[in-house]
């Protein structure tokens, strides 16, 4: 991508943190440039989900620094992070199962006490037409892939600048994974939203990423600006998983 003098969307510097007294992250550093799709890979237990939770202040950060669009947000409350233009979608496509699709989408801004912007709902339906046709359906009656689309669409209602996705393909069929990755790529290309995602499905993630970090034991041990080349040389990633 073209070089820029702007501060990156996200700059994580030597972050140490975790749950309670246990440090899962042990000096994690990574950057996400504006307009990029950045992928975080790693085996189970590498700290991928913990890293994303640290960025949105859902876990303790003991030391290090997290900059968002050039401003230090280390230790800020989660609501403040969201108000600064971040949307976070945790694992599993979590939705309110007893609510309709539309009720789920309208919940997007409730947590931060912010009204939904005019036209945001219809714009979201244009981007996810399948959800418009199911807007009155209860989320419990949707397929796993459709629930993941609801979770993703709900994140976009607030028109974020940075979208953070934790294992969006988890538990989905290969065809649905491909459709989901196409939507994520379109979010960057058509809406101009920066995307940071963690994935177990290396092949799917590498196909859409601009850059990749590989985590092991709470640290980034590998960075590549050529993820499609990594996709052609999966042996390199295989060695990282086995290291």
Image: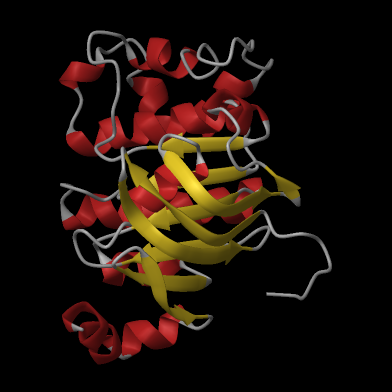
Above or below residue 235? Residue 150 is: above
Pinpoint residue 223: horizontal percent, then vertical percent: 47, 79
Spot the residue most to the front: 21
Q: Give the colour scheme of this rendering.
A: secondary structure
Residue sitting at 48 percent across and 81 percent down? 224
- Placement of the N terminus among the 4 image quadrants: bottom right
Residue sitting at 62 percent across and 48 percent down? 193
Pinpoint residue 18: horizontal percent, then vertical percent: 35, 46
Above or below residue 102? Residue 216 is: below
Towards the viewer: 188 or 3: 3
- Placement of the C terminus among the 4 image quadrants: bottom left
Residue sitting at 46 percent across and 51 percent down? 184
Above or below residue 94? Residue 35 is: below
Pinpoint residue 117: horizontal percent, then vertical percent: 67, 17
User: Would residue 166 be seen by someone viewing this image from the given angle?
Assistant: no
Residue sitting at 40 percent across and 38 percent down? 59
Relative to residue 34, is residue 86 drawn left or right? left
Pinpoint residue 93: horizontal percent, then vertical percent: 28, 34
Relative to residue 217, is residue 210 drawn left or right? right
């Amino acid at each position: 991508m073209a070089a820029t003098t702007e501060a990156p969307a996200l700059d994580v510097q030597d972050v140490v943190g975790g749950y309670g007294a246990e440090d899962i992250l042990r000096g994690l550093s990574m950057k996400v440039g504006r307009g990029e799709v950045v992928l975080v890979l790693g085996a189970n237990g590498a700290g991928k989900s913990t890293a994303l939770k640290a960025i949105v202040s859902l876990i303790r950060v003991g030391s290090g620094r997290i900059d968002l669009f050039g401003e230090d947000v280390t230790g800020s409350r989660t609501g403040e992070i969201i108000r600064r233009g971040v949307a976070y979608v945790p694992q599993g496509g979590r939705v309110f199962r007893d609510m309709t699709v539309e009720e789920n989408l309208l919940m997007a801004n409730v947590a931060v006490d912010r009204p939904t912007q005019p036209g945001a709902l219809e714009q979201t339906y244009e981007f996810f037409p399948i959800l418009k046709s199911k807007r009155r359906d209860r989320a419990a009656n949707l397929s796993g892939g459709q629930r993941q689309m609801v979770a993703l669409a709900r994140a976009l209602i607030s028109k974020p600048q940075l979208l953070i996705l934790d294992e969006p393909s988890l538990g989905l069929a290969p065809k649905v994974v491909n459709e989901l990755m196409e939507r994520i790529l379109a979010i960057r290309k058509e809406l101009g939203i920066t995307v940071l995602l963690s994935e177990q499905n290396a092949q799917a993630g590498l196909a859409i990423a601009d850059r990749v970090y590989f985590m092991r034991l709470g640290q980034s041990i590998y960075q590549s600006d050529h993820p499609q080349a990594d996709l052609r040389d999966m042996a390199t990633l295989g060695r990282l998983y086995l290291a």
